[in-house]
Amino acid sequence: MAHKFNPEHSHKLDTEERKKAMPPENTLKELGLKDGDVFIDVGCGPGYFTEAALTLVGKKGKVFGLDISAEMLEKLKRRIAGNHHGNLELLQSGDYIFPLEDSTGTFALLSYVFHEVDDPGKFLRESM
């Protein structure tokens, strides 16, 4: 069985070392996220990339934060309270069930989540 990240350790996902190695806003810019995109953050956790995505997609864009953990989604909700333009939707997902219609997004990110599933192929098919 795959290891699931413990939400009690969410502080480990937002460290200065991680920001130096993979600065969220710069990383998303380099990957091509831009104003008006519809960004899906699969396994968003407490919002390391989600918060930066809100800035980059702007008022015309939309951000979906998906996570299997209701606790992580709550942490993210508190983190960004008041820092978005109604363009964020947080959704609890399953390992292989993403509660969005196919082709909803223009940009999806799966970062630090692949090791948490038992069937990587099934996971990737659901993300398409």
Image: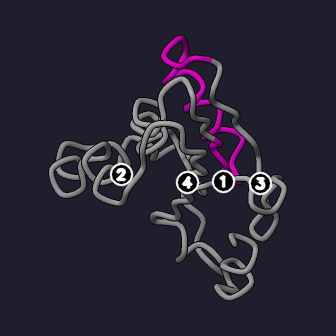
* Callout 2: SS: helix
Q: Which is more foreground, mark 3 or mark 2?
A: 2
User: Considering only vertical position in the picture, is 47 above or below 22?
Assistant: above
Q: Which is more foreground, mark 3 or mark 1?
A: 1
Name the N-terminal-most of marks 2 and 4: 4
Q: Residues within 10 Å of mark 3 (few under 14, many from 20)?
A: some
Percent from the top left, x then y, of residue 23?
24, 48
Calculate the distance from the C-alpha at mark 3 to the C-alpha at mark 4. 16 Å
Q: Which residue is mark 4?
A: 6
Q: In this image, 48 relative to 87: left or right?
A: left
* Callout 4: SS: loop
Calculate the distance from the C-alpha at mark 2 to the C-alpha at mark 4. 25 Å
Percent from the top left, x then y, of residue 43?
59, 56
Q: Amino acid at mark 3?
A: Ser
Q: Which residue is mark 2?
A: 28
User: Considering only vertical position in the picture, is 19 above or below 115?
Assistant: above
Q: Which residues are magenta?
A: 64-85
Q: Amino acid at mark 4?
A: Asn
Q: In this image, 93 relative to 84: left or right?
A: right
Q: Which residue is mark 3?
A: 93
Along the line of sight, the residue nearer the viewer: 1 or 60: 60
Name the N-terminal-most of marks 3 and 4: 4
Along the line of sight, the residue nearer the viewer: 106 or 17: 106
Locate the N terminus by quadrant. Answer: bottom right
> What residue is drawn where x is 37% and y is 56%?
32
Q: Which residue is mark 1?
A: 105
Q: Which is more foreground, mark 2 or mark 4?
A: 2
